[in-house]
Image (cartoon, helix red, strand yellow):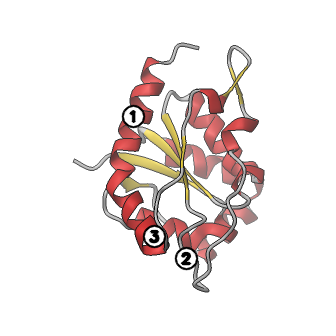
């Protein structure tokens, strides 16, 4: 049975890469927004974006942060991570910089977004949440590695969050 996950990523930079992961068919995820749909949500301002995110998190068991070069610097990615944690959802990061974008280019690895978030007890989230770097010498190998491991990563994240005591 496919798990329900919320995919968090930097839309402008990583939409193409994120679509590859979301379309693997291993997990069920939040509905994909077109560029035009995202622009409509954004035009509604911060409250509209927050409502959309909050609505998408309902019924999800895990937040999968697809980490590219600038993901850790994105306000709404950080909100999605914090909100997912607050709701008790599993949280896992997967580096996607090695996947090709629309222009057939890879990217640089970005910083760990979890290292910028403090959880109750004053610890960085990175001390309890993993950021996974898929193996592979090219985009196809990295894609296959993500596809073959994503379900296990999500299961581990869900279990880790369920066992964590604030």
The residue located at (50%, 27%) in the rendering is 88
Residue 118 at what x, y percent from top left? 73, 27
**SS label for mark 1:** helix
Gap between marks 1 and 2, in whole Å? 27 Å
Q: Is residue 8 left or right of residue 32?
A: right
Identify which residue is drawn at 45% across, 40% down: 62
Q: Residues within 10 Å of mark 2 (few under 14, many from 20)?
A: many
Q: Residues within 10 Å of mark 3 (few under 14, many from 20)?
A: some
Q: 116 and 12: which one is in front?
A: 116
Q: Find residue 110 and report its horizontal and vertical position in percent.
A: 71, 56
- Residue for badge 2: 100
Front: mark 3 or 2? 2
Q: Position of residue 34 (x, y in %)?
A: 55, 74
Can see residue 33? no
Is the residue under label 2 in contact with that under label 3 (CB below 8 Å)? no
Which residue is identified by label 3?
A: 20
Indicate whether 39 appears above or below 114: below
81 relative position to 42: left or right? left
């Amino acid at each position: 049975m496919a798990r329900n996950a919320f995919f968090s990523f930097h839309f402008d930079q990583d939409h193409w890469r994120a679509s590859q992961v979301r379309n693997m068919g291993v997990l069920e995820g939040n509905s994909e927004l077109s560029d035009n749909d995202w622009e409509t949500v954004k035009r509604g301002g911060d409250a509209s974006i927050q409502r959309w995110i909050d609505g998408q998190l309902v019924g999800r068991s895990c937040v999968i942060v697809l980490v590219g070069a600038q993901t850790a610097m994105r306000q709404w990615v950080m909100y999605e991570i914090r909100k997912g944690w607050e709701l008790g959802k599993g949280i896992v990061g997967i580096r996607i910089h090695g996947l090709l974008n629309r222009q057939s280019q890879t990217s640089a690895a970005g910083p760990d977004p979890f290292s910028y978030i403090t959880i109750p007890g004053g610890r960085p989230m990175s001390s309890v949440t993993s950021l996974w770097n898929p193996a592979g010498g090219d985009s196809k190998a990295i894609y296959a590695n993500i596809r073959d491991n994503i379900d296990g990563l999500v299961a581990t994240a869900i279990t880790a969050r369920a066992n964590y005591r604030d």
